[in-house]
Image (cartoon, rainbow, N blue to C red):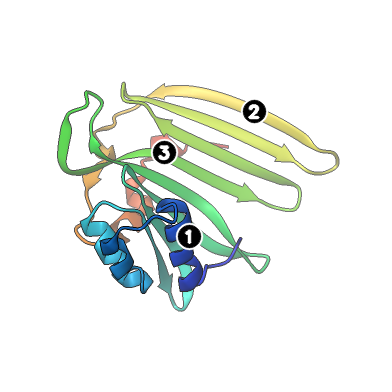
Amino acid sequence: MKEVMSEEDTLDNILTIWLENKPTAEDKKHLKNAEDWAKYAFDNDKNYYVTFFKGGEPIACVFNYFETISIDFLTYHNGELFIYLFMVYDKGKDSHNKDVDGKIFLRQINLYDEDADKRITNEIFFKDNGIMNVETITKTKRPEFRMDYEEKETQVNLSHNWLRKPQNYTDYEYLFDYQNILKPEYLDLP
């Protein structure tokens, strides 16, 4: 939609999409406002969204899903919200299906760049065996439409992909420091 949804629309999405219009009695108690829902959802491993603002402008939207945490990094582009970076963290299991207490794992990074002539999408996916898979899609709009696709794999050290889990429903700001989270070898992209 390229805009921040209202609290009412957010709660409606949670009710209709994530709860499939079948909330429990306890769910109903917490669907009165988005903040109450987020607190309840965090404590009970349910889905919720939190949008963070700086200087009155949205900078990131966090979607806490029962298996992952995804973050859309936002900016305005031509008057509309634009996602320039998307990061996904897996919760709770390592590559050998062992519980990893208190940690989340950076699984995926998507970087977007767009101007009047082209859009470049870089999708980075970290495999459990230490392989980083990078797909680059370049869509050229002018002078004529063309799409180029490139894929490469690289062995990388994944030990620094593990970060602590959020401690409460708003504890995500440390994940916004993507300059320190994203290692230089991850970003050798066009």
Count of numbered circles on the image: 3
Q: Earlier in the sequence, mark 1 or mark 3?
A: 1
For the residue labelled by badge 1, is the local secondary structure a helix, a strand or a loop? Answer: helix
Q: SS of the residue at dot 2?
A: strand
Q: Mark 2 belongs to which amino acid?
A: Tyr
Q: Which residue is mark 2?
A: 149
Q: Which mark is residue 108?
A: 3
Q: Name which residue type carries label 1.
A: Asn
Residue 33 lies, in percent from the top left, at: 37, 74
Which label sits in the foreground, 1 or 3? Answer: 1
The residue closer to the viewer here, 96 or 74, is 96
Residue at horizontal 67%, vertical 37%? Answer: 138
Left or right: 94 with respect to 9?
left
Vertical order, 138 against 127 (above or below): below
Q: Label 2 neighbourhood size at 10 Å, few (<14), some (14-19), many (20+)?
A: few
Q: Nearer the viewer, residue 147 or 50?
A: 50
CA gap, disc 1 to disc 3?
Answer: 25 Å
> Mark 2, mark 1: which one is toward the viewer?
1
Q: Is residue 169 visible?
A: no
Judge whether 89 appears above or below 51 on screen: above
Q: Calculate the distance from the C-alpha at mark 3 to the C-alpha at mark 2.
A: 18 Å
Whichever of labels 3 and 2 marks the residue nearer the N terminus, that label is 3
- Can the viewer see residue 83 in this picture? yes
Q: Position of residue 125 (x, y in %)?
A: 43, 32
Q: Which residue is mark 1?
A: 13
SS at circle 3: strand
Residue at 36% in and 74% down: 32
